[in-house]
Image: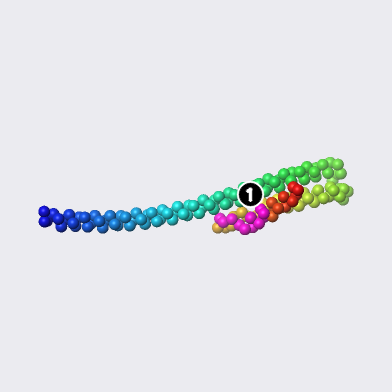
Amino acid sequence: MTVLAPSIGAILLVVGVKSQVELDKALANQAQAMQVVEELRTLSLQCSAIRRRSVLFYELLARLDIQFAQLISDMNRIVDQEGEDYATFLPTSKRTIAMAATMAATIKEVLDTPILNGDGDLTDESKAMADQMNTILAKMSQ
């Protein structure tokens, strides 16, 4: 029994040290996993923000398209009624043509606005453009 006790003690010491090493590895793995979880949360939030901005631009372009389609219809009516010589158009017709040209330029400007920068982050430019266009459209619909 006296020979067995030190052997059991040595085995328990080795097992205890090995268990501590395994516990340390497990805790390190847990820390890495928590870091990955946090990174995934951040990426998820970023993806949601990108989606919201994309939807905002989609809705903005849809609203502009509705306005533009009406202006194109009005221009077709003008050409049918007044001919193709802009110089002979009525003042209201000339305003309609000017509004259509402005709307086309506005749509192009919106389409040319980058939503993301080279790093994949949302641009301040796209936020400013969306805010500006929503303000203009709100005024137009009054």
Q: Nearer the viewer, residue 42 or 101?
A: 42
Q: Where is residue 138 in the image (x, y as percent from the top left)?
A: 72, 50
* 27 displayed left or right of 5: right
* 99 displayed left or right of 53: right
Q: Nearer the viewer, residue 13 or 107?
A: 13
Quadrant location, the N terminus: bottom left
Q: Where is residue 108 in the image (x, y as percent from the top left)?
A: 70, 52
Is 33 placed above or below 78 here? below
Is residue 42 part of the magenta span, yes or no?
no
Q: Is mark 1 on a helix, strand or loop?
A: helix
Residue 48 visible in the snapshot: yes
Is residue 122 part of the magenta span, yes or no?
yes
Marks counted in the figure total 1
Q: Nearer the viewer, residue 111 or 135?
A: 135
Q: How is the image coloured?
A: rainbow
Q: Residues within 10 Å of mark 1 (few under 14, many from 20)?
A: some
* 36 displayed left or right of 73: left
Query: Residue at coordinates 29% horizontally, 57% vertically from top-left?
Result: 20
Q: Where is residue 96 in the image (x, y as percent from the top left)?
A: 81, 48
Residue 15 found in image quarter:
bottom left
Dominant SS of magenta comes to: helix
Query: Residue at coordinates 46% horizontally, 54% vertically from top-left?
Result: 38
Residue 112 visible in the snapshot: no
The range drawn in magenta is 120-131
Outermost residue, right side? 88
Query: Residue at coordinates 51% horizontally, 53% vertically from top-left?
Result: 43
The amino acid sitting under disc 1 is Leu
Badge 1 is on which residue?
A: 56
Query: Residue at coordinates 30% horizontally, 57% vertically from top-left?
Result: 21
Q: Where is residue 8 in the image (x, y as percent from the top left)?
A: 17, 54
